[in-house]
Image (tube, rainbow, N blue to C red):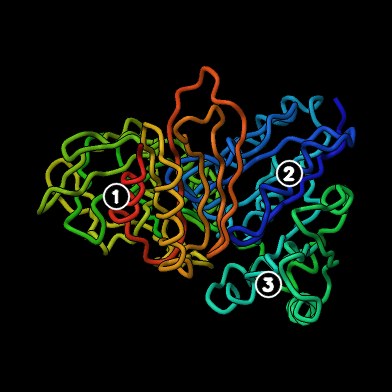
Amino acid sequence: MSTTKVPVTILTGFLGAGKTTLLNRILSEQHGKRIAVIENEYGEIGIDQGLVIDADEEIFEMSNGCICCTVRGDLIRILGNLFKRRDKFDYVLVETTGLADPGPVAQTFFMDDDVHEQFALDGIVTLVDAKHVEQQLDHTRESAEQIAFADVLILNKTDLVEPARLDELERRVRGMNALAHIHRASHGEVDLDRVVGLSAFDLDQALSRKPSFLEPEYPFEWSGVYALEAGHYRLMLDDGPDPAMSLVAVTLPSADETALRAGAERCVRLYAEEPVRTQPGEPVEPATHVELELTEPGTKVFPLTIDTPGLVGLYTEHFAEEFNLRLTDAEGRLLQPVAEHAWVAQHEHDDTVTSVGIEVAGDVDANRLNRWLSTLLAERGIDIFRMKGFISIAGEAERFVFQGVHMLFDGRPDRAWGDLPRGNQLVFIGRNLDRAALEAGFRACLA
């Protein structure tokens, strides 16, 4: 097996910039390159893989999380599995969710020893929606971060913008990132050589733009280290801000900074696994991602059994004081941690931006659908950053694929349903979305 590192391109851009369109063009061209694709979706239901054309390339999907914080372990796991089939591909393309800060994604290729040994970050390519980017820059932090961190900027949808305004936009973008190469495109028509094989990422430049670049992001906020003898313990939590809290308990060789960070990297991978939902009274399993159910009022107690004496680190999604988290021995004596650490995320997403996923069986009346979408976009289009999905239209043999950005909407017939069960999947991403109204509106379109 070749010892040459596998080049990786990170493809980013705000919601609706055209990443999937570009990806489809790359996968459909006869360029002779073998590309493995990793997708990350922001949404309740995963549909992006279904929007990507059928291709020989291998496509992996990570759903329901931000690739820059909660599923970094998933990215590490998939890259590890990919490398076992090194002879099957030449490049890896990581398409991030439109709400991701690309910095922590790039960071994975330097912070994880196995990934760093096997893969090389080739470059960060950011698609910019020329039609809507100025509005996005005025209201979201992520769009600015994506532009500032790019090695290559592709101004997409140039056919929707007047030339003079496009020149002004390019000057604004150049002011945010003077080092990136800028290319113009419409409908994602970009030469593959501008996306892969760039040898463009420069760690020193990344550190100059963001000195904290090599400070890792973690999906937890607090860890406490306890010196425990073998025996039975009780983890106790009071009412807090959330109805559940994720936690991982791992053994540590010491309580110093190095050991805490090594434990954190181990927990990143464990947090990427599906959590074991644990009710009060049920035991917390060590070295397992557990989700403590905290809906019952009052104090919740979870047993913890330690088989071997030593140091145990609790890595929790929230700060301990938010739930008055404490650990007692079998006799009820309160135990104090011998060390504590706060893991503060460098970025936070806008809590008003959410996703609404709708999955409904049955066929849709096309006229009702058109009327509903027209009214919805006219009234709420400014708050709908992105919408996408598949529709089963009554009397049509092909599924209908649609995508939208703010007031712009595009739909077309796609592959035939064939033997697949007909149905509808829609995702809306935006600010202050009304789930009940969206679902009721769509259900009213059913034939």
Query: Type of residue at label 3?
Result: Pro
Say which residue label 3 marks: 211
Say which residue label 2 marks: 93
Q: Which of 410 and 29 is in front in this view?
A: 410
Residue 114: x and y in percent read 69, 39
- Of helix, strand and loop, which one carries label 3? loop
| Side (left or right) of 111 relative to 203 | left
State the quadrant of the N terminus: top right
**How far separated are the C-alphas under marks 3 and 1?**
48 Å
Query: Type of residue at label 2?
Result: Leu
| Side (left or right) of 212 relative to 25 | left
Residue farthest along the top direction in this orientation: 419
How packed mark 2 is, by other alpha carbons closer than 10 Å (few <14, some 14-19, many 20 or more), is: many
Front of the two marks 2 and 3: 2
| Side (left or right) of 226 relative to 152 | left
Point 52% across, 17% down: residue: 419
